[in-house]
Image: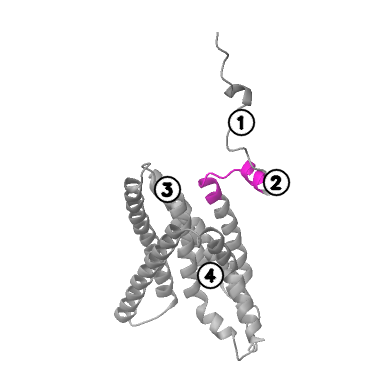
Amino acid sequence: MGAAVFFGCAAIAFGPAAALVLLTVAAEPLRVIVLVAGAFFWLLSLLAASLLWFVSVQLSGREDAALLLLGAAAAVLLQELCRFACFKILKKADEGLATLSEDGQSPISLREMAYVSGLSFGIISGVFSIVNTLADSAGPGTVGIHGDSPYYFITSAFLTMALVLLHTFWGIIFFDACERRHAGGLGLVVGSHLLTSGLTFLNPWYEASLGPIFILTLCTGLWAFGTAGGSFRNVLKCLSCKQEPEGQVMLYSALQVPPEE
C-alpha cells in the first residue's frame, strides 16, 4: 500500500511537469540549459531564505507563528527577486545569441525562456516541498490513525501540482511584465504568490486552501495564455488539428515564359 501511495502521489505532483518537459523541453538543448539555469536561481533563493530564517531564529530565540509567516513572506520575495535576476541574465544571453547568429535573431525567444524558467522554478520548488512527504508515504504507518485527515498525502500532491503550474504561469507573466516595464503585472505576480503561500497556512482545512489555490491556478493560467499571445481561435484550431498552408501556391500558368513577338 505504501508503494502505491508513493507512486500515485508522485505521479499526481509531477505528472504534468514531466509531460511538459518531455514534450516541449527535452528535445531542445537551449531549453534544457534554461531549465537548469532556472533551477539554479531558485536554489539561490532557497539558500538566502534558509540563512535569513537561521539568523532570525537565533536573534529572536523563538519559533512562533508570527515568525513563520514573516519567513514565508520573505521566502516568496526572495524567489521573485531571483526570478528577476534570472530574467536579466537570460535577457543578456538572448542578446548575445542574437549577435552570434547569422540572421541576427536569437534561436530561442524570450517567451520560450520565460516558460522554461518558470517550469524549472516550479519543478525544483515542488521537489523540495513534497520530498519529505513522499518519503513518509512509502510507509510504514497509517494516515489519520490519530484523528488527522486521511487525505494528507493526496492533497499535498495536488497542492504541489498546482504550485508547479503556478510557477510556470508566473514565469511567463513576470518576464513579459519586465520586458514591457509593467509594474502592475509584477505586483500581481508577487501578490498572487504571497496569497498562495498564505493559503497553505489554512491546512489541514483543505477546503479552504486547495479550492482557492486551484481557482487561482486556473485564472493565472488563462492570464499567462493571453500574455503569451494565445486566443480562443488558436485553441479551436489546435483541437480541430487543422493546419494553415505555409505559403501561397503559384499556378503553373504563371511560370510559363511569355511568347516572343
Whether residue 188 is visible: no
Q: Which quadrant holds the N terminus?
A: bottom right
What secondary structure is found at the residue carrying circle 3?
helix
What secondary structure is found at the residue carrying circle 1?
loop
Q: Residue at x 59, y 21 (%)?
A: 256
Q: CA distance from mark 2 to mark 4?
A: 39 Å
Q: Residues within 10 Å of mark 1 (few under 14, many from 20)?
A: few
Q: Residues within 10 Å of mark 3 (few under 14, many from 20)?
A: some
Q: Which mark is residue 238?
A: none
In the image, which residues are magenta? 223-238
Q: Which mark is residue 240?
A: 2
Mark 3 or 2: in front is: 2
The mark that comes first in sequence, 3 or 2, is 3
Q: CA distance from mark 3 to mark 1?
A: 40 Å
Q: Residues within 10 Å of mark 4 (few under 14, many from 20)?
A: some
The residue tagged 1 is: 249
Q: Which mark is residue 200?
A: 4
Q: Is residue 191 magenta?
A: no
Residue 205: quarter of image:
bottom right
Q: CA distance from mark 3 to mark 4?
A: 26 Å
The residue tagged 3 is: 177
